[in-house]
């Protein structure tokens, strides 16, 4: 298992590289670094069979996104809008993620 470092963060746009949703893009809803997995919006949908309860009064089959391995996704650069690998660079005393193709910063400073 890795040392809990993911190159993908929440709210990144990613491209799926393999599996049933290959070629689709989506936004990362959740990053799970201890499991090396990410949850992507609209990708890797599974059906959850639920009994009726207070949250879901009718119960039934509910589609939801399941976690997928982080190695199956690649970040899409917002500047050049291409899937890219990630480089790290020191900017103003902070390590930030940089697009390998165009050199733009992937981390938006707030």
Image (cartoon, rainbow, N blue to C red):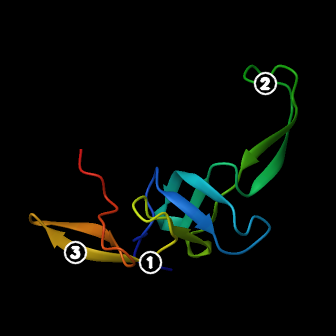
Report which residue position mark 3 lands on.
89
* Along the line of sight, the residue nearer the viewer: 40 or 77: 77
Report which residue position mark 1 lands on.
85
Q: 92 above or below 42?
A: below
Q: Residues within 10 Å of mark 2 (few under 14, many from 20)?
A: few
SS state under label 1: loop
Horizontal side of 89 relative to 8 (left or right) equals left
Horizontal side of 11 relative to 66 (left or right) equals left
On the rendered image, what quadrant is the C terminus found in?
Answer: top left
Q: 53 above or below 26?
A: above
Measure the alpha-carbon separation of dots 1 and 2.
41 Å
Of pointers 1 and 2, the one earlier in the residue sequence: 2
Q: Residue at x 34, y 62 (%)?
A: 106
* Along the line of sight, the residue nearer the viewer: 3 or 27: 27
Measure the alpha-carbon separation of dots 2 and 3.
47 Å
Q: Residues within 10 Å of mark 3 (few under 14, many from 20)?
A: some
- Disc on res. 56: 2
Residue 85 in the image, given as x and y percentages of width and height: 44, 77
């Amino acid at each position: 298992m890795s040392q809990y470092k993911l190159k993908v963060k929440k709210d990144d746009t990613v491209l799926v590289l393999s599996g049933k949703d290959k070629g689709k893009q989506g936004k990362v809803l959740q990053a799970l670094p201890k499991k090396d997995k990410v949850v992507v919006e609209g990708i890797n949908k599974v059906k959850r069979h639920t009994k009726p309860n207070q949250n879901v009064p009718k119960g039934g089959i509910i589609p939801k996104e399941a976690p997928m391995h982080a190695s199956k996704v690649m970040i899409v650069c917002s500047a050049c809008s291409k899937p890219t690998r990630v480089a790290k660079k020191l900017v103003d005393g902070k390590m930030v993620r940089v697009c390998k193709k165009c050199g733009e910063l992937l981390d938006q400073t707030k």
